[in-house]
Amino acid sequence: MHPFAYVEPKTVKEAVAALSKYGDKARPLAGGTDLLVQTRAGRFNLDAVVNLKKIPELMSVKLDANGLEVGAAVPCYRVYEDPKVSAAFPGLIDAASLIGGIQIQSRASMGGNLCNSSPSADATCPMIVHNGVAVIAGPKGTRKVAIEEFCTGPGKNALAAGEFVVTLQFPKPSPTFGAAYERFIPRNEMDIAVVGVASSVTLDAAGKTIKNARIALAAVGPIPIYAVAASEWLKGKPANEASIAQAAAMAKAAARPITDMRGTIEQRKHLVEVLARRTLTKAIERARGK
Ligand SMILES: Cc1cc2nc3c(=O)[nH]c(=O)nc-3n(C[C@H](O)[C@H](O)[C@H](O)COP(=O)(O)OP(=O)(O)OC[C@H]3O[C@@H](n4cnc5c(N)ncnc54)[C@H](O)[C@@H]3O)c2cc1C
């Protein structure tokens, strides 16, 4: 492996300076579960690795009246082991608790999952349906990008030179909000999603009508797909099987999969419909407090 400098900034400003200094010859390091594997495999030829885990903002989890703010380098286990976060953000927990196994979850972050920008990333779609926003720092200051606009292609994203993600923000869900994420893999764990679907709903006070919905699809396009038409169509519809079936069919239509070693176009489209139906059903049950 090409020798590289190891930089350990203590502040956001120092991290921006280090990333700007080395340009595309530097990568931020969170858990390293993608970065180290990919660097060893020759994907990057780095002069510097910039460890983000000594920066307090990157490692904090804040839950208050406004919502949840998760540092971009916080490992998954810290998200799902917090009972208050688990109760309010079920879609995030579904993802954080299935990424790799327990060892991977002790290192891997949701920020790293997002910034690796794989179309099959398990955390990205749940972040989309939880209305997540990435807070980005860089040489020109701070800006925010909605998670559904973050990925721009396989392994590519909206980050410009010298920029990195500081935190992930999620608004406080209403008491009638529910979300769920499921993926299809040929094995029980430790596999890459052939298809993943995240869904969220906000119901009316009676729990009968869908006021708001979001559906997002993993591994069926070059980027995680926010299924806008299916999500918008659900607004104002009764929270019943017929609405779920129609929205699942619309989600299937939004999928743009390829055939590869993990699955065919036909299988993946079919799986989108199945998983959209399942996750919408579960999101509604959770919204009703079940
Ligand atoms: C055995 C194994 C099993 C796995 N299973 C799964 C799985 O089931 N589901 C799944 O989705 N993934 C899986 N992965 C992939 C990986 O664990 C996840 O993508 C993980 O969330 C990456 O997080 P990390 O903190 O380790 O990121 P890192 O490896 O540290 O970083 C990933 C990429 O993002 C960049 N980066 C990291 N943080 C930032 C930041 N704050 N700002 C800008 N860029 C940043 C890095 O430079 C790098 O390019 C698995 C990996 C392994 C080795």
Image (cartoon, grey):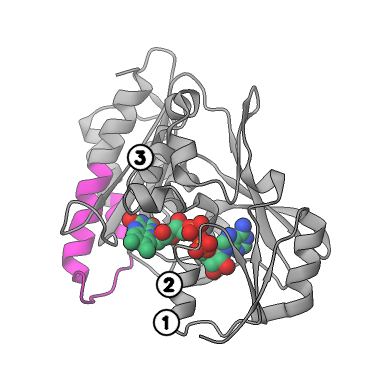
Residue 288 place in picture, x, y as percent: 34, 18
Kind of residue sitting beneath label 1: Ala
Task: Point out the stretch of residues depicted in magenta.
Answer: 250-277
On the question of residue 41 being in view, the answer is yes
Kind of residue sitting beneath label 2: Val
Q: Which residue is mark 3?
A: 94
Determine if the C-beta at disc 2 is less than 8 A from ligand 1.
Answer: yes
Q: Residue furthest top?
A: 206
* Mark 1 and mark 2 residues within 8 Å of each other at the beta carbon: yes
110 in the magenta segment: no
Q: Which residue is mark 1?
A: 41
Q: Secondary structure at mark 2?
A: helix
Q: Secondary structure at mark 3?
A: helix
Residue 25 place in picture, x, y as percent: 66, 81
Q: Nearer the viewer, residue 169 or 103?
A: 103
Horizontal side of residue 193 vs 82, given as left or right: left
Instruction: Kindly report the secondary structure that dominates the magenta region of the rendered protein.
Output: helix
Mark 3: give few (<14), some (14-19) or many (20+) Cα within 10 Å: many
Residue 238 place in picture, x, y as percent: 32, 26
Mark 2: give few (<14), some (14-19) or many (20+) Cα within 10 Å: few
State the image quarter where residue 66 is shown: top right
Specify the quadrant that holds the C terminus.
top left
Compared to residue 161, the image places residue 288 above or below, namely above
Q: Which residue is mark 2?
A: 37
